[in-house]
Image (cartoon, rainbow, N blue to C red):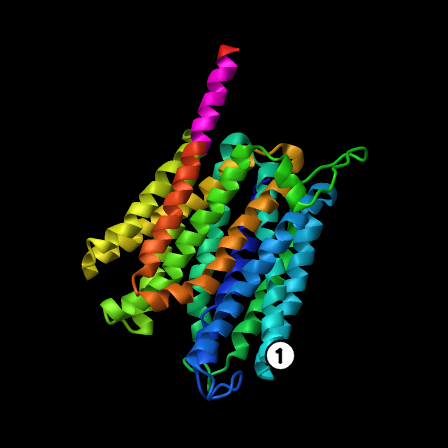
Amino acid sequence: MKRAIFVLVFVAFLDAAGLGLVFPLFASMLFDPDCALLRPETSDTVRGIWLGALISAAPTTQMLVSSSLGSLSDRIGRKPLILSCLLFGTVAYLFAAYAVHTENLLGLLFSRICIGIPFATFGLTNAAISDISTDEGKGRGFAWINSAYGSGLAIGPLLGGVLAGNLLFAEESFVRPFIISSMLLAIAVLFVIYWLPETRKLSEEEAIEEDSLLKELKRADTKLIFLLLGTFLFTFGWVFYIEMIPVWWMSRYDLDPCEVGILFGFGSLWFVLTSTFVAGPLLKRINPLVLFEAFALFLCLSIWIVFVIDAPIAYLFEIAVQNMAAGLLFPVTAMAVSNMASADHQGKIMGIYAAAEGLGFGLSPISSGLFIGIHLMAPIAIGGLFVLIAFILAHVVRRRESLALIREKVE
């Protein structure tokens, strides 16, 4: 199954790179008075609202559809749904390119909503990893998937800026990155068709009841609900911090957009390296609940320490440490949730897990603009607070699991 893992990781990278390619373009398009998506007299407040809507549209769709896709994949298999989502995304990016070309803002927003569907394959790829991995190898698989997504989201914005600019082309064009994103997903489609085997094996007699997200959560163990809530809170807190902190960077350190991009890339490098080379070995030896608790607290403290130490050189160290903690937490939370699901319901549970992450990614851009207007250091305070609450939930879950194990031994 090494080939299947390679294809899943490569598809995850292409999917994330496609999303990242267009991510940095929206601010330039909406706040450029020469761009006709909005009238020149449009206020910055309205432009900011549209920016938040465009950024949050895809992860919101991911949140809404991930659970249903995961449940359906338990019944019909992972490959058909991964393939369908990627095909849908290929068309959605082409529609986005057309909307940008015709300067149709509503059309661009609609395309962003649709693009959330291929991004929902995150839960499906995690479920596929669970299908083909042993208990010892599952953590390494989750680490590679998260590393692939992190790499794509790190490299994508850099390539998107180059493709949209006039460095390699005669003139600037916001349309090119969307077309390239469509091409990346088309390549992913070919890999899935020809090289990805079906990982979910169902006998003809096997049938899995399809339930709604709310019904599944009502039936779920309290520990699983706490883990999913902790996943949402950690994701929301981390995204709130890392997406809004550039405003503080520019104010505190007088960085220009290029320097901000370099600092982002520096942090992303540590995220990817940690996910790739550290998360797997740790998950092989240590209970993921213990790791969730430890690194959530570590991430919270590494964010809040900025209040005390904010020298430029020290901050380079801090941003590296923060990204290392986040790079560990994503595969750790995936492993913790997966361990609480049976083999027959991996797709459903990992779909709910992806929905929890999508909710964190989707709500953060909508709410962060309000708080950044109150105070430039709000991302540090609020981001760390949500991660701290995730730590508390992880601690509660670990304590309950420890007590359950003690009761089993006594009985």
Which quarter of the picture shows residue 392?
Answer: top left
**Left or right, 249 with reference to 187:** left
For this orientation, the residue located farthest to the top is: 411
- The residue carrying mark 1 is 98
Residue at horizontal 60 percent and vertical 42 percent from the top:
127
Which stretch is magenta?
Answer: 397-409
Q: Position of residue 146 (x, y in %)?
A: 48, 49
Q: How many marks?
A: 1
Residue at horizontal 30 percent and vertical 55 percent from the top:
319
**Left or right, 36 with reference to 312:** right
**Left or right, 179 with reference to 280:** right
Q: Position of residue 353 (x, y in %)?
A: 55, 45
**Residue 25 shows up from this direction:** no
Main secondary structure of the magenta stretch: helix
Work out whether 351 lies above or below 105. Answer: above
- The N terminus: image quadrant: top right
Residue at horizontal 57 percent and vertical 32 percent from the top:
221
**Residue 223 shows up from this direction:** yes
